[in-house]
Image (cartoon, grey):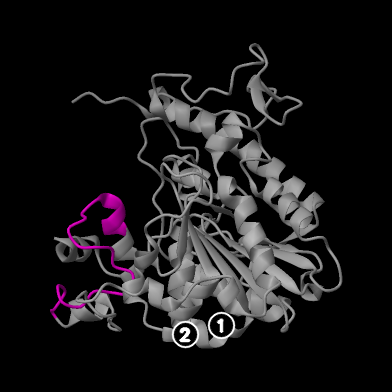
């Protein structure tokens, strides 16, 4: 048989993470544009080869992430490594916190989607509208403008990083799954670099749920004023992670939580088991969705999610929900902080209860039910409605209940 020698195989494409070398620049509107065509956005497809396109895109994203991180640090945020005390060469995940976090009376905790890196909201928005608008740069500025820094209501920030939980040992840095797929290979036809479930994990941050727990149990517990109040934002899968964590630990964190805002959440109020947390969601939580309604127009999902639900002004792109609803969310937080009477900022928990005749909340988890051989009668706390077998819903059930994809699919049938 004939075979090609390794030195004759096509080389893996490499691009410099430098805008000028890539033929791009940042205009006076903070937008990345082509040097040859200043009105044109940076291109995604430059070849018929998908590997070339992905590597080119990743090179641009590396520059964008460095730019965002530097500008957030200029705004007074600093890198904190988890686990606490880890050196730069030990497995760790970076998060961003205010430099004077321990002095703040209010702290905004941001739990983003698992698909984005630290500080990034949506590359789509960065490409169309600008770097600051598609990242947390504008959000930090907006939050400070709505909440002027003073002794009584000084505002701090904690920005979690659930999207970069893969440790790359050779470079001593954390990566997202998308960046891992773009690691250079010996040739363009090599299989992707295999990920080791032990060596490429970060202690106490092996997945996004454990990362959220680490944010609360280590960052907030050790670096935040015990008397400070928390305003919490959860985006997509980050919203599911934070609801799941608080439902299990509300007796610990309930007293210091001021308000919660969720962007396109996945949880189901029916399966939340802590009655005090359920009541808090009804009175101090808002959720925002994509749809035909305008910004702050009430959405009909309140009974499912257990809180007041609104449209964001975004028609259908999920990652664009939070930026469009950000001003409304931050104003809601300010209003919540100013009210001692919680009934003024929410609505009665009775308005969020299920219609008569529907299934009561179940405290047993799907994983326990599966172990007992009764997967169809024991839904977990975050199981979406049955008969929805989309890939997203199957993944949500499997991840939230720590069961296999096959078991999750069986339950949803």
Start and end of the magenta stretch? 373-395
Spot occupied by residue 238 in the image (x, y as percentages of width and height): 48, 61
Q: Nearer the viewer, residue 133 or 74?
A: 133
- The residue depicted at 28 percent of the width and 79 percent of the height is 365
Viewport quadrant of the C terminus: bottom left
- Asked if disc 2 and disc 1 are in contact, CB closer than 8 Å, the reply is yes
Q: Residues within 10 Å of mark 1 (few under 14, many from 20)?
A: some
- Is most of the magenta stretch helix, strand or loop? loop
As rendered, which of 204 and 293 lies closer to the eye? 293
| Residue 287, percent from left and from top | 48, 60
**Residue at point 66% right, 49% down?**
136
The answer to which image quadrant residue 273 occupies is bottom left
Which element is circle 1 on?
Answer: helix
Regarding residue 204, the answer to whether it shows in the image is: no
Numbered disc 2: secondary structure: helix
> Alpha carbon of mark 2 to alpha carbon of mark 1: how far?
8 Å
25 sits left or right of 176 in the view: right
Q: Is residue 325 above or below residue 277?
A: above
Name the residue located 80 percent from the left edge and 52 percent from the top edge: 75
Furthest-top residue in this view: 36
Q: Residues within 10 Å of mark 2 (few under 14, many from 20)?
A: few
Magenta includes 380? yes
Q: Which residue is mark 1?
A: 254
- In this image, 14 relative to 150: left or right? left
- Give residue 276's mark: 2
Work out whether residue 265 or residue 375 is closer to the camera in this orientation and state it.
265
Would you say residue 264 is visible in this rendering?
yes
């Amino acid at each position: 048989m004939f075979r090609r020698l390794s030195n004759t195989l096509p080389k893996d494409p490499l691009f410099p993470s430098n805008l000028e070398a890539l033929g791009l620049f940042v205009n006076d509107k903070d937008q990345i544009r082509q040097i040859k065509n200043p009105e044109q956005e940076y291109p995604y497809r430059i070849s018929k080869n998908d590997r070339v396109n992905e590597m080119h895109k990743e090179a641009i994203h590396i520059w964008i992430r460095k730019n965002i991180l530097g500008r957030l640090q200029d705004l007074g945020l600093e890198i904190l490594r988890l686990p606490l005390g880890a050196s730069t060469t030990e497995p760790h995940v970076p998060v961003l916190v205010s430099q004077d976090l321990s002095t703040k009376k209010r702290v905004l905790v941001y739990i983003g989607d698992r698909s984005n890196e630290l500080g990034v909201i949506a590359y789509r928005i960065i490409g169309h509208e600008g770097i600051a608008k598609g990242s947390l740069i504008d959000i930090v500025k907006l939050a400070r403008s709505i909440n002027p820094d003073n002794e009584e209501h000084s505002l701090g920030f904690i920005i979690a990083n659930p999207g970069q939980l893969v440790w790359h040992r050779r470079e001593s840095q954390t990566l997202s799954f998308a960046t891992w797929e773009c690691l250079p290979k010996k040739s363009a036809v090599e299989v992707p670099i295999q990920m080791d479930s032990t060596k490429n994990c970060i202690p106490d941050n092996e997945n996004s749920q454990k990362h959220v727990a680490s944010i609360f149990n280590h960052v907030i517990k050790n670096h935040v004023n015990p008397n400070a109040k928390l305003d919490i934002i959860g985006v997509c899968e980050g919203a599911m992670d934070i609801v799941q964590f608080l439902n299990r630990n509300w007796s610990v964190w309930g007293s210091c939580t001021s308000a919660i805002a969720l962007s396109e959440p996945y949880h189901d109020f029916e399966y939340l088991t802590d009655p005090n947390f359920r009541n808090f969601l009804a009175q101090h939580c808002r959720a925002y969705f994509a749809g035909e309604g305008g910004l702050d127009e009430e959405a009909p999902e309140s009974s499912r999610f257990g809180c007041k639900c609104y449209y964001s002004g975004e028609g259908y792109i999920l990652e664009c929900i939070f930026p469009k609803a950000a001003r409304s969310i931050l104003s809601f937080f300010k209003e919540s902080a100013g009210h001692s009477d919680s009934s003024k900022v929410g609505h009665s928990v009775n308005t969020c209860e299920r219609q008569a005749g529907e299934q009561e909340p179940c405290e047993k988890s799907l994983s326990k039910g599966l172990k007992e051989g009764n997967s169809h009668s024991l839904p977990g706390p975050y199981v979406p409605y049955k008969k929805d077998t989309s890939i997203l819903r199957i993944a949500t059930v499997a991840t939230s209940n720590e069961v296999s994809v096959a078991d999750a699919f069986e339950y949803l049938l």
